[in-house]
Amino acid sequence: MNQVDVAIIGAGPAGLFAAFECGMLKLSSVLIDALNEVGGQCAALYPEKPIFDIPAHPAIEAGALVAQLEAQLAPFAPARLLGRRIEGLSGGPNAFVLTTDRGEQVFARAVLIAAGAGAFGPNRPPLDGLDAYEATGCVQYYVRRREDFRGRRVVIAGGGDSAVDWALQLKDVAEKIYVVHRRSKFRAAPETAAQLDAAHARGEVELVIPYQLSALHGQDGALHAVELADLDGARLRIEADRLLPFFGLSMDLGPIAGWGLALDRHHVQVAPATCETSSPGIFAIGDVATYPGKLKLILQGFSEAAMAAHAIHPVVRPGEALHFEYSTSKGVVGVA
């Protein structure tokens, strides 16, 4: 575990597929993640959320996607250091030393950062008494189980993909769904935004526009109503017992920000063709990486994982020719 070809920081979808790609090239790896389980946000925040842009899957729940990635990776059985945060990085290509917050050391020939949004947390609305409602689950920022909202009156606040997606997913479970947004145009994918409009036209979802969250009303952590305000200060009270504010995640690179890598607004700059950072031997893929034309899609992270693995091979196997073959012709390396 402590001496590998590639140390992969982040065990979300991109990190898991990177470990598979390394395995296909006969490179050993270790997956390191601050969470106690693999899967990143897909597993920790929204395992039941369907994903629609994975090739060959018209729809697949995030948790199922992680399970499939694990099954794909299983033949290579990479080492795992979960519930650990990398606090220190020293050395260079073929001689990196990574130190965890538990004092463990990992020796690696190359480093691959697949840290997603880094240490993430929700952007919380500035509402009085919010803590009490968070403690009882009346205010939540993630949906782990749709059934938790069965028969509930749910206010969803926000105008991005999460707000629109969960309004569509919960409309057949909740008693009532209200979507609160400060303007009529949503920032979600055009197709799902159109589906939301259609659901509104059918009376399945109520759009409350243009309004913003103003106050919460309830007792002893039990939510009874959500108060809204428009841009002119007019007030509207909605009877509800659950609030889902989807205002995005705050991103914190943590110690990674101090490793001397070229950064662009909390993202690591990489070369598009190789995903190598400004520091030789250190690569970055997925949401944490940026370059001109970057798309924040899981499938783009998968592509970057393959490119990075191939770029890493000559770093850790200098002078060794890599005769690339399609997996359809060679199968899984080392597996009969």
Image: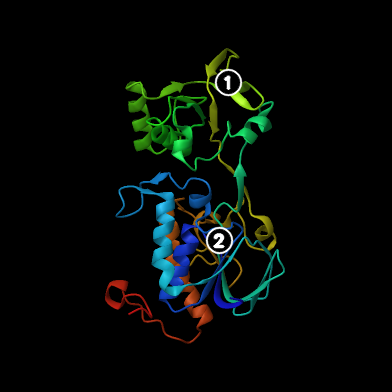
Q: Is residue 227 left or right of residue 258?
A: left
The answer to which image quadrant residue 130 occupies is top right
Q: Where is residue 221 shown, x and y percent of the image?
A: 64, 27
| Residue 178 in sight from this viewpoint | yes
Q: Amino acid at mark 1?
A: His
- Residue found 40% across the figure and 81% down from its top: 322
Element type at mark 1: strand
Q: Which mark is residue 224?
A: 1
Instruction: Kindly identify which residue carries mark 2.
Output: 10
Q: Quadrant of the N terminus?
A: bottom right
Towards the viewer: 133 or 119: 133
The crowding category of the residue bearing disc 1, from other C-alpha atoms within 10 Å (few below 14, some 14 to 19, many at least 20), is some
- Residue found 32% across the figure and 73% down from its top: 327
- Residue found 35% across the figure and 21% down from its top: 203
Towards the viewer: 166 or 189: 166
Say if 160 sits above or below 215 in the image: below
